[in-house]
């Protein structure tokens, strides 16, 4: 068992509140892999995802005093990392590439056996093929669980745009998966 499993979240939080580097490193190690996956789902490349992760954890350590232990520490960290990734993308690009409204995407039905053949890395590579804005909407809705209203507020788009981009992204993903098999 690694050292990071020896400490509870409450102990990690308290150590981080005391600016103890050991606890900061343990908290980072405990959640960095999962949070890096989140960053990868928004970033255009691995270098950008690493920058997002680093910036996100800096915010986590700066804001650790605001964690009230009403929810899970992982959920709190995840929200900060997601918001950092979104802020980063907004700063890098004031306009996002969405799936063109004129581009009709016919949604195909997927056989369950097809989904069993695709691992998470394969699915991640397929999602990466979506236009940036559509990928962000898809991740926020399908992965992070935000509502279309929350997505619209975060991305400064309309709720209708969020809904239509999600629908188009889902259809395009099904087609891309079908083409792989």
Image: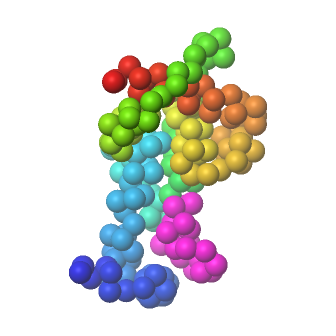
Q: Answer yes or no: is residue 79 visible.
A: yes
Above-or-below relation of 160 to 120 = above
Above-or-below relation of 107 to 14 = above
**Would you identify the image quadrant in which residue 26 lies?**
bottom left
Above-or-below relation of 58 to 116 = below
**Viewer-proximal residue among 1 and 111:** 111
Residue 23 drawn at (x, y percent): 37, 82
Residue 171 drawn at (x, y percent): 55, 25
Q: Answer yes or no: is residue 45 visible.
A: no
Magenta stretch: includes residue 162: no
Q: Name the magenta segment's main secondary structure.
A: helix
**Viewport quadrant of the N terminus:** bottom left
- Give the side of residue 86 with respect to residue 40, left or right: right
Residue 162 drawn at (x, y percent): 68, 34
**Viewer-proximal residue among 56 and 99:** 99
At horizontal 76% and vertical 31% (from top left) the residue drawn is 160
């Amino acid at each position: 068992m690694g050292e990071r499993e020896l400490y509870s979240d409450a102990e990690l939080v308290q150590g981080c509140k005391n600016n103890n580097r050991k606890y900061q490193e343990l908290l980072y190690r405990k959640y960095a892999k999962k949070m890096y996956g989140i960053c990868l789902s928004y970033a255009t490349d691995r270098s950008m995802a690493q920058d997002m992760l680093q910036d996100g954890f800096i915010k986590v350590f700066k804001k650790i005093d605001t964690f009230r232990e009403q929810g899970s520490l992982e959920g709190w960290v995840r929200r900060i990392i997601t918001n950092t990734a979104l802020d980063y993308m907004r700063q890098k690009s004031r306009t996002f590439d969405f799936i063109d409204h004129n581009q009709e995407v016919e949604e195909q039905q997927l056989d369950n056996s097809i989904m069993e053949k695709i691992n998470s890395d394969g699915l991640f590579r397929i999602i990466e093929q979506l236009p940036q804005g559509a990928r962000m909407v898809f991740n926020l809705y399908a992965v992070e669980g935000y509502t279309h209203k929350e997505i619209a507020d975060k991305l400064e788009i309309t709720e209708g745009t969020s809904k239509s981009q999600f629908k188009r992204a889902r259809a395009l993903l099904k087609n891309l998966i079908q083409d792989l098999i």
